[in-house]
Amino acid sequence: MIYHSGTVKLEKRYSYGLTLLAFFTYRRASKNSPGNLYQPNQLMRAVTGLTQKYRFVSSMLYELPFGKGKTLPEP
């Protein structure tokens, strides 16, 4: 099985504990299928059906402004 992938990560931190995070992944997998022993494997190669080509995942984090070592923001 042959597997290729690439990932891009974006992270942005804002004031008051707000963070945005995003990942984008491109991937491709190909597999050799069993066949004639006298043919080269490159002729029998195909993209797998289980491949999810694109994937985008994002998250947001907000740090609460109270607790040990924190002060509440002034209104």
Image (tube, helix red, strand yellow):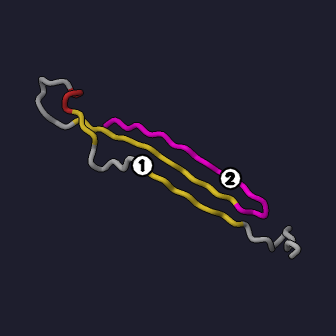
Residue 21 vs residue 35: left or right? right
Element at badge 1? strand
- Residue neighbourhood size for the residue with mark 2, other residues' Cα within 10 Å, grouped as few (<14), some (14–19), many (≥20): few
Residue reaching furthest to the front: 75
Task: Give the residue displayed 80% in from the left and 73% down from the top.
Answer: 67
Q: Quadrant of the N terminus?
A: top left
Q: Which mark is residue 54?
A: 1
Q: Is residue 5 magenta?
A: yes
Task: Give the residue displayed 20% in from the left and 28% down from the top.
Answer: 43
Q: Which residue is mark 2?
A: 12
Which image quadrant is residue 37 in? top left
Q: Which stretch appears magenta?
A: 1-18
Q: Is residue 2 magenta?
A: yes
Above or below 43: residue 60: below
Q: Work out whether mark 1 precedes mark 2 in sequence or the reverse, and give the earlier one.
A: 2
Instruction: Give the residue type at disc 1.
Output: Tyr
Residue 47 vs residue 44: left or right? right
Residue 69 vs residue 23: left or right? right
Instruction: Give the residue type at disc 2.
Output: Lys
Q: Quadrant of the C terminus?
A: bottom right
* Nearest to the observer: residue 72 or residue 37: 72
Which image quadrant is residue 42 in? top left
How far is disc 1 from disc 2 in space, using C-alphas?
22 Å
Whole-percent x, y for residue 20 in the image: 64, 58
SS majority, magenta: strand
Element at badge 2? strand
